[in-house]
Amino acid sequence: MLGSLFPEKLGFTQCHEHLMLSKGISYECNPSLWMDDIEASVKEVTSYRKMGGAAFVEAQPGGCNRMSEELKEISARTGIHIVASTGFHKMQFYPKGHWIGNTDRDRLAGFFIEELTKGMYVGTEHASPFENRTSDGRTDLKGKVFQTRTCAGIIKTALDSCGLDGPYRELFLAAAKAQKETNAPMMVHIEEGSSPVSLMRFLEETGVDLHRVYFCHMDRACRNWEVFRQVLRRGVTLEFDTIGRFRYHSDEEELRLVKRILAENEEQLLMSLDTTRARLKSYCEDAIGLTYILEVFLPMMRQEGISESQLNKIFKVNPGRILTW
Ligand SMILES: [Zn+2]
């Protein structure tokens, strides 16, 4: 959000975070999915910068409580690069009958491409971006949708447990079309119980370059080594973020997973925290905070013998490669 990215200049990057989320359906699903206090979020991101952070990917797409204007402000105030998302999330995060679930693939793809190349839309929770547009409705929103001049940098998608059923097939085809036309990176939320391999084959058949794709939460949603190997072999990058999330597993367990991946492949691993309100210090005093990797997990990785060159790849080189287009 501070302009275009250059891979060699990107610096330390966490590839799946949430720093701003307006109160809406996400909050109704989980009260932790609500962070709309810009001062608190600026404070959190400032600490991240002080500890050595340079950039992060904000993983909430439009239409389900993304706050793109506030993200832009955070970026400007902290000097941190924020890569914002277009695309789609799980349908449970949208109001019933939301336009995202009943728009044809070409129109959707056009919308994603516009958000990537011209500017993100605000107000798409309540109204379709295909109608009611205002050229600059900043002063009189009233349920209208308007386009900002800040572009998204990544296509967020979500593989739910139902796979490509319902609206997901059209949504993935739209995302694939936008990916192919722009060469933007695509991140995929992987739900436990879904089939990442089937999705990978589907994306490959549509002509998506799998080297531009990363599968998120693979350390908790899928812990099958055969699956890890299959997707790595085809070029998909893995993003691990089950760190400081002790109801899933300990950090020691996470380290074992990371070391096992690194023994086979150092080029296709990214790491992050997938923060929510309950994991951000500025919102919840006893939370681990956005700096948890920098402050706690990196020293643990070093102690476990993970080399500086490997750390450099996970947090700088690999994000730089996949996020620039
Ligand atoms: Zn997330």
Image (cartoon, rainbow, N blue to C red):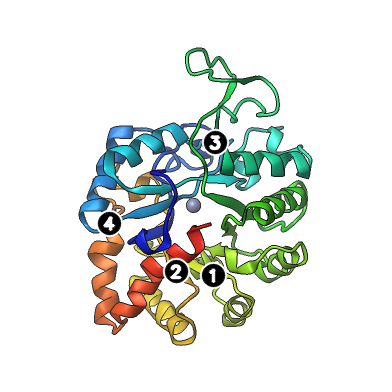
- State the SS at label 4: loop
Q: Would you say the residues marked 2 and 1 are in contact, meaning their CB atoms lie under 8 Å apart? A: yes
Is residue 252 visible from the viewing direction of this image? Answer: no
Instruction: Return the residue found at the far left.
Output: 50
Q: Quadrant of residue 52?
A: bottom left
Task: Judge: label 2 CB < 8 Å from ligand 1.
Answer: no
- Circle nearer the N terminus (4, 1): 1
Q: Is residue 79 above or below residue 221?
A: above
Contact flag, marks 4 and 1 (Cβ < 8 Å): no
Alpha carbon distance from label 2 to label 1: 9 Å
Q: Earlier in the sequence, mark 2 or mark 1?
A: 1
Looking at the image, residue 295 sits to the left or right of residue 188; the answer is left
Verify CB contact (< 8 Å) between mark 2 and mark 4: no
The amino acid at mark 1 is Thr
User: How many marks are shown on the rendered structure?
Assistant: 4
Circle 4 Cα neighbour tier, 10 Å, few/some/many (<14 / 14–19 / ≥20): many
Residue at image mark 3:
119
| Amino acid type, callout 2 | Asn
Residue 136, above or below 214: above
Q: Secondary structure at mark 2?
A: helix
- Dot 2 alpha-carbon crowd within 10 angstroms: few under 14, some 14 to 19, many 20 or more: many
Location of the N terminus by quadrant is: top left
Q: Which mark is residue 237?
A: 1
Q: In whole angstroms, how far apart are the C-alphas of marks 3 and 2?
A: 26 Å
Res 318 label: 2
Q: With respect to residue 226, does 110 lie above or below? A: above
* Mark 3 Cα-neighbour bin, 10 Å: few <14, some 14–19, many ≥20: some
The residue positioned 63% from the left and 33% from the top of the image is 95
- Badge nearest the viewer, 2 or 4: 2
